Amino acid sequence: MIVRWIEGQVELEPDHKTMLHDTVGLALGVYSPADQEQAGLLLAEMLDCLRRQLWKTRLLAERFELEGELKASIPTPKQRWHQYHLATLECVWNYTWPPRGLDEVETIR
């Protein structure tokens, strides 16, 4: 499995909180030159388990919260150019920056 950051966005909320939204891509791959059908089924099962676990947990390190939908895809055999079965899972995580900077400024004054 490969984890890759895709994009991020920083938003200032009306209550002066800073909210971050980061899109992360997970790439899964299974290789089996002997039994391509079994490799494809294994990949589909892995993708299903990962999606279920991410949705069930939804909170990582007591800070990052899963939001919205999980986008999953498996390329069709016509689009595949190697013997690996690949799947991608794209998810968006949000978290709020702690207001330490504002607290520190108030303390200095």
Image: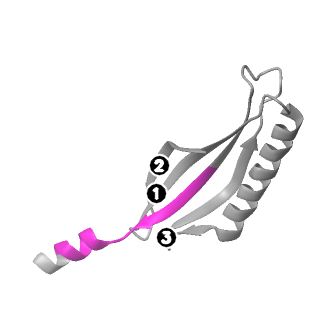
Q: Is residue 25 magenta?
A: no
Q: Mark 1 against mark 3, which lies toward the viewer?
A: 3
Q: Residue at x 38, y 68 (%)?
A: 16
User: Please, what secondary structure does the residue beneath circle 1 have?
Assistant: strand
The residue segment tinted magenta is 91-105
Farthest bottom residue in view: 107
Element assignment for label 2: strand
Looking at the picture, which amino acid does disc 2 mark? Gln
Mark 3: few/some/many CA within 10 Å (<14, 14-19, 20+): few
* Amino acid under disc 1: Leu
- Residue 9 circle label: 2
Foreground: 37 or 62?
37
- Choose mark 2 or mark 3, whichever is in front: 3
Q: Position of residue 11 (x, y in %)?
A: 45, 55
Nearer to me, 108 or 54: 54
Q: Are marks 1 and 2 in contact (CB under 8 Å)?
A: yes
Provide the residue designation for mark 1.
Answer: 20
Q: Which residue is mark 3?
A: 61
Does residue 109 appear left or right of residue 61 in this picture? left
Sequence-wise first label, 2 or 3: 2
Looking at the rendered structure, the secondary structure element under dot 3 is loop
N-terminal of the pair, mark 1 or mark 2, is 2
**Residue 38 rendering spot, x and y as whole percentages:** 87, 40
Judge whether residue 103 is colored magenta: yes
